[in-house]
Image (cartoon, rainbow, N blue to C red):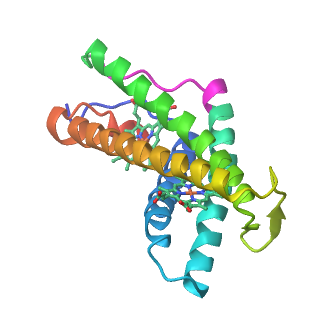
């Protein structure tokens, strides 16, 4: 019911959700296009921005999880079927897991590649491992596979949010607005 009042996520949870969403939606396409660019200044800058956003996301998601564990979300509206409770929990767990693992894999692969990780031109992250290009290629291939998995999970997540809002009109999206 569109006019029904719904219990919402806390303002902090909403702020963290939408900040994460904007950063993730910026950094994924950046990851996919930067390899197609010719080597040079633009590619290097995009690499720096992609890695910096990735590092920031790791910190934000860690803070968000700490907040989430101490502030349980509002209950889903009555009438949401049990399978949708399960499906949303599964996708949310997957999103959190990938957003924590992906930056570490990026850091690991970049270290093995021997490239510096310049975080917003403020400081450099230390290398996690020594230079080893064949290993770097394998690790970064996993970074790509995980990036595609994340994109699919986000498409399902956004599709579900829009389905609840425009088709079922049950207030699920308004809990996060
Ligand atoms: C949540 C954070 C991140 C997401 C969602 C993400 C996503 C992606 C995606 C989708 C690609 C394209 C992969 C491909 O075309 O095969 C990519 C490429 C890349 N990312 Fe990330 N990334 C994140 C964090 C990081 C971090 C923290 C670093 C390094 C510190 C990093 C380093 C790289 C590198 C070096 C590539 C190029 C891969 C290659 O050479 O094959 N990423 N990233
Ligand atoms: C693009 C990156 C996005 C990521 C990584 C993301 C991630 C998440 C995560 C992890 C949760 C679970 C919150 C919890 O712990 O309870 C969540 C909830 C939610 N998200 Fe997103 N989200 C993104 C984009 C969006 C967009 C674009 C929309 C709307 C169109 C949206 C709508 C919602 C809604 C309505 C909830 C609450 C769902 C519920 O409690 O069942 N999200 N999001």
Q: Position of residue 32 (x, y in %)?
A: 44, 63
Question: Per the image, is 145 magenta?
Answer: no
Number of numbered discs overlaid on the protein picture: 0
Looking at the image, residue 97 sits to the left or right of residue 151; the answer is right
Q: Is residue 38 above or below residue 142?
A: below
Q: Residue at x 56, y 79 (%)?
A: 43
Looking at the image, residue 115 sits to the left or right of residue 22; the answer is right
Q: Residue at x 68, y 32 (%)?
A: 66
Q: Position of residue 56 (x, y in %)?
A: 67, 56
Front residue of 150/11: it is: 150
Front residue of 73/49: it is: 49
Q: Position of residue 72 (x, y in %)?
A: 56, 23
Q: Residue 108: in sight, yes or no?
A: yes
Question: Residue 89 is drawn in which quadrant?
Answer: top left
Q: Quadrant of the N terminus?
A: top left
Question: Per the image, is 76 magenta?
Answer: yes
Looking at the image, residue 58 sits to the left or right of residue 4; the answer is right
Question: Residue 175 is drawn in which quadrant?
Answer: top left
Q: Residue at x 65, y 71 (%)?
A: 48
Front residue of 154/127: it is: 127
Q: Residue at x 68, y 46 (%)?
A: 104
Q: Position of residue 177 (x, y in %)?
A: 41, 46
Question: Residue 8 is drawn in which quadrant?
Answer: top left
**Magenta segment, prevailing SS (helix, strand or loop):** loop
Please identify the residue farthest to the front as the structure is shown: 134
Please identify the residue farthest to the bottom as the structure is shown: 41
**What range of the chain is rendered magenta?**
68-78
Q: Residue 177: in sight, yes or no?
A: no
Whereabouts is ligand 1, in terms of quadrant?
A: bottom right
Please identify the residue farthest to the top as the structure is shown: 82
């Amino acid at each position: 019911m569109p006019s029904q009042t719904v219990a919402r996520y806390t303002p902090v949870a909403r702020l963290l959700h939408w900040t994460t969403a904007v950063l993730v939606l910026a950094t994924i396409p950046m990851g996919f296009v930067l390899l197609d660019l010719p080597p040079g200044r633009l590619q290097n800058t995009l690499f720096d921005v992609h890695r910096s956003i990735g590092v920031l996301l790791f910190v934000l998601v860690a803070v968000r999880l700490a907040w989430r564990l101490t502030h349980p979300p509002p209950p889903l509206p009555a009438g949401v079927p049990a399978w949708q409770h399960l499906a949303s929990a599964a996708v949310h767990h997957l999103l959190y897991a990938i957003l924590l693992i992906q930056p570490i894999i990026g850091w690991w692969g970049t270290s093995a590649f021997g490239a510096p990780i310049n975080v917003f031109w403020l400081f450099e992250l230390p290398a996690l491992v020594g230079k080893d290009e064949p290993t770097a290629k394998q690790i970064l291939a996993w970074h790509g596979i995980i990036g595609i998995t994340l994109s699919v999970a986000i498409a399902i997540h956004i599709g579900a949010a829009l389905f609840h809002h425009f088709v079922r009109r049950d207030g699920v999206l308004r809990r996060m607005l």
